[in-house]
Image (cartoon, rainbow, N blue to C red):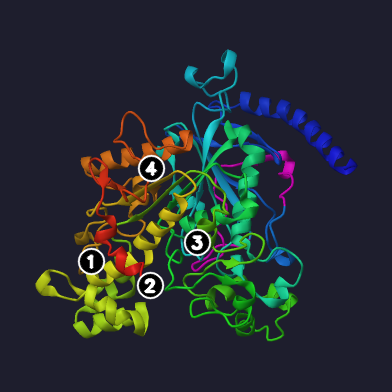
Amino acid sequence: MKSSGFASKLLLALAAICVVTLGSVLSASADDKPFAFTQSGFVIGTTTNGVNEFLGIPYAAPPVGALRWLPPERYGFFPGFFLKATTFGSQCTQGGGGSENCLFLNVYTPQFGFGGGRRVRAEDRGPGGGFPRGLPVMFWIHGGGLTGGAGSDYDPSELVKKGVIVVTINYRLGLLGFYAQSALDSEGHEAGNYGFMDQQFALNWVRRNIAGFGGDPNQVTIFGESAGGQSVYSQLASPTAAHLFRGAIAESGSYVEFQDYFDDIVTLPIAETTGTPLVPAGNSIATSVGCASETALCLRAVPATTFVGVEPGVLYPFVDGTLLTQTPGQAFASGEFNQVPVISGTNHDEYRIFVADEYDLGSALATLAEYDAAELALWGPTLAPIVDSLYPDSPANDVDGPEALGASGTDGIFACPARNADQLLSQFVTTYTYEFNDENAPPAQSSVPGLTFPLGAYHSAELQYLFVLGGVPAPFTPAQQQLSAAMVTYWTQFAKNLNPNSPTEPVWSPYSTSTDEFQSLIPPTPMVESTFAAEHLCEFWDAF
């Protein structure tokens, strides 16, 4: 306790010294840079198109060497107590590159917020005209199958301009982030879901530091897509995430959950030893990378890129007994989860993009035999014949193999499982459900050489309606631009009020099992959809 008190006094003393130094630095600058104070020191950012950007802030110590496969630890102080936060930190190790030193986050604030003498709008001042009220915070968890992606891939400027702060993060990926192995798991620390531990550690960083950026640590909404949506469901189910957020948005995160025909989330002992068809056994992985001894010392000496070479394209979390004591489905059914309001949804044609990726843009499904083989590979010998009768390859009925396979994958992997989650959640918390329904979402079929079928409202298509991706705004039609504006409003209103509604957009009512209605996100104007279950054949899928 004494050493902790000394550290606090030292931090305050350093802060006092640096306030003076920072003031002289900023006064010497011709174009005041936005700045903020954190427990690690001062960060100085940049301003782009009305948004303050603080990039590449380390939120935890680099998980390298002896810290590989350990829970994250605090970063400490910035060198010289200053950080020039103007470039992104390294993405986490994945196919194509990255680094183990990757636990960075990025903070985006409205220009009128704290820092650098920026103007404060009258409506954002606190009582008596003082400092601005703390802004709501949106905490983005990127997708990528838990094996790829980075926070730097997403520019949240349009969300920020609606009066929220957005934080995007990196978290450990692949076998460096999600690995069950006997020697590691017997070390006495929290084990398995290291990437989820990073997410929670970053959320704790937000609680401790976001006020320095003008944010309210008590108004945090987590949101994510695909593996990020799965992460949101997992954080809802996690006892160790209690009180770290007050709202949650899960986009297309239902792909391994909320049904009985896949069993992908298993316990650590199973994942360590036998594994499953979709979860390689951790001890076998150790042998494959040259550690037949299966010792932690050997594993921590293996180059990070070696693990990328032996991991599957998608990984799954584990029921580890601490961060996850049960699967999200079990937690939602029992009510033993972090009960906060939720937005949950999927896209109308989720699986089509996977068909394009796996089957040469659809050209590898040109015959009925090829379609049947793909169907068998996806659903196995028990389900495939039944699925075939409901999703036939029938050009005469204007349905070809790629679209039929895409429909069964969408319905059985995403749409109906997500609806199951909605029905469980809505028993306990206010739940807003949606389906993204822009069948002409960019890119157009004609712009993808060799694509034999339209992608429709494919998996991840909605992201470009919320973020700028790749530095270039999507080529929207006026109607699509109107839908984008509506979605940005819904998402940010939810972060502000735990309710997506506003005077400017169509009413979005909470989900009820009695009406079974979804908000259809369709251009130009969202509307109520009452045919979701029938269109996706959920009665069939729910029977398994």
Q: Which residue in the protein does label 4 denote?
A: 510
CA–CA distance between discs 4 and 1? 41 Å
Kind of residue sitting beneath label 4? Pro
Percent position of residue 183, x then y: 72, 76
Viewer-proximal residue, 13 or 424? 424
Give the vertical position of 232 relative to 221 (above or below): below
Question: Residue 84 in the image: x percent, y percent?
Answer: 61, 41
How far from the left and from the top, in percent, is residue 528?
Answer: 26, 44
User: Tag on residue 449?
Assistant: 1
Q: Which residues are magenta?
A: 74-100
Q: Residue at x 56, y 56 (%)?
A: 237
Secondary structure beneath disc 1?
loop
Instruction: Determine the residue positioned at 70% across, 82% down.
Output: 294
Mark 1 or mark 3, earlier in chain: 3
- Report whether 78 appears left or right of 538: right
**Marks 4, 1: nearer the viewer:** 4
**Marks 3 and 2: CB-CB under 8 Å?**
no
Name the quadrant of the C terminus.
bottom left
Category of crowding for the residue at label 2, using alpha-carbon neighbours closer than 10 angstroms: few (below 14), some (14–19), many (at least 20): few
Disc 4 secondary structure class: loop
The correct choice, above or below, for 483 with respect to 33 in the image is below
- Pinpoint residue 361: horizontal percent, then vertical percent: 27, 71
Disc number at residue 419? none
Query: Residue flagged by tag 1: what amino acid is it?
Result: Pro
Asked if marks 1 and 2 touch (Cβ < 8 Å), the reply is no
Label 2: which secondary element: loop
- Residue in front for this viewpoint, 332 or 177: 332
Secondary structure, mark 3, is helix
Q: Is residue 155 left or right of residue 522?
A: right
Residue 316 relative to residue 38: left or right? left
